[in-house]
């Protein structure tokens, strides 16, 4: 729950964002200071929605922002864009080793727009970096009957086993999802 001063700051920031004054982007950057780290993502997403941020604004804020600001941009994508125009931002986040960005990148926007090959590699990256696969939106639907994902998972498990390393439990969960169902 926000403090009274944080709520007042957010209300003022949302008004600035809705009016698209030049100051709203500065408020986007300072949301963590005013609302606290536990509310920063939500506050930033609200600001992006209030500003009706388009692809150009989202791209600028993403590329010039901190990891926390990038995360908020990624989290806002499904509520602001209906097409794949922001996929370069998702793809950039998937190339990082920042697990908070990986988690945010694999939300509903990626589930709807990420190409199968890139999506499969993102799932493997989650396994490799320890990001819980529960953060992958649409995992069960996209993995169902995906023979190529099953092959990639089996290869990864074999590599880990041959190297004397443990196989992540999540790998077995995802592998089970790739099994075709009677309805598939």
Image: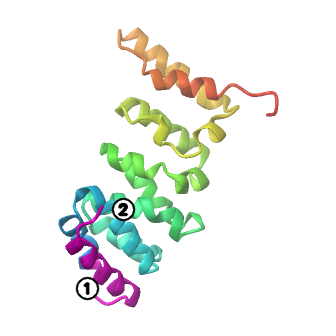
The answer to which quarter of the image holds residue 30 is bottom left
Say which label, 1 or 2, has the lower sequence index.
1
Q: How is the image coloured?
A: rainbow
Where residue 134 appears, x then y in whole percent?
48, 37
- Residue at label 2? 72
Element type at mark 1: loop
Q: Residue at x 65, y 28 (%)?
A: 178
Q: Position of residue 131 (x, y in %)?
A: 39, 36
Question: Residue beneath label 1, please?
Answer: 23
9 inside magenta stretch: yes
Residue 63: image location, x then y, percent: 31, 66
Q: CA distance from mark 1 to mark 2?
A: 18 Å
Give the side of residue 34 with respect to residue 153, left or right: left
Q: Quadrant of the N terminus?
A: bottom left
**Is residue 21 visible in this depiction of the protein?**
yes
Q: Quadrant of the C terminus?
A: top right
**Residue pictured at 67% horizontal, 33% vertical:** 146
Q: Position of residue 36 (x, y in %)?
A: 22, 61
Main secondary structure type of the part rendered in magenta = helix
Q: Give the extent of the magenta segment.
A: 1-25
In this picture, is 125 found above or below 52? Answer: above
Q: Is residue 126 above or below residue 57?
A: above
Q: Looking at the image, can residue 94 be seen?
A: no
Label 2, secondary structure: give it. helix
Horizontal side of 32 relative to 169 (left or right) equals: left
Q: Pointer 2: residues within 10 angstroms few (<14), some, or many (20+)?
A: many
Left or right: 179 as drawn, with respect to 132: right
- Circle 1 Cα neighbour tier, 10 Å, few/some/many (<14 / 14–19 / ≥20): few
- Residue sitting nearer the eye, 55 or 181: 181
- Residue 182, compared with residue 163, is above or below; it is below
């Amino acid at each position: 729950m926000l403090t009274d001063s944080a709520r007042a700051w957010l209300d003022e920031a949302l008004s600035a964002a809705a009016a698209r004054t030049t100051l709203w982007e500065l408020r986007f950057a300072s949301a963590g200071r005013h609302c606290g780290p536990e509310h920063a993502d939500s506050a930033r997403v609200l600001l992006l929605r209030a500003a009706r941020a388009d692809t150009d604004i989202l791209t600028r804020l993403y590329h010039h922002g901190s990891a926390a600001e990038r995360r908020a941009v990624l989290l806002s994508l499904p509520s602001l864009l209906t097409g794949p125009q922001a996929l370069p931002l998702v793809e950039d986040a998937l190339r990082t080793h920042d697990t908070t960005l990986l988690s945010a990148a694999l939300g509903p926007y990626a589930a709807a727009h990420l190409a199968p090959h890139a999506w499969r590699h993102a799932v493997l990256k989650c396994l490799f970096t320890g990001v819980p696969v529960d953060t992958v939106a649409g995992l069960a639907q996209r993995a169902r009957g995906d023979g190529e994902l099953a092959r990639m998972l089996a290869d990864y498990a074999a590599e880990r086993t041959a190297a004397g390393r443990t196989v992540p439990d999540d790998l077995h969960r995802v592998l089970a999802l790739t099994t075709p169902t009677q309805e598939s």
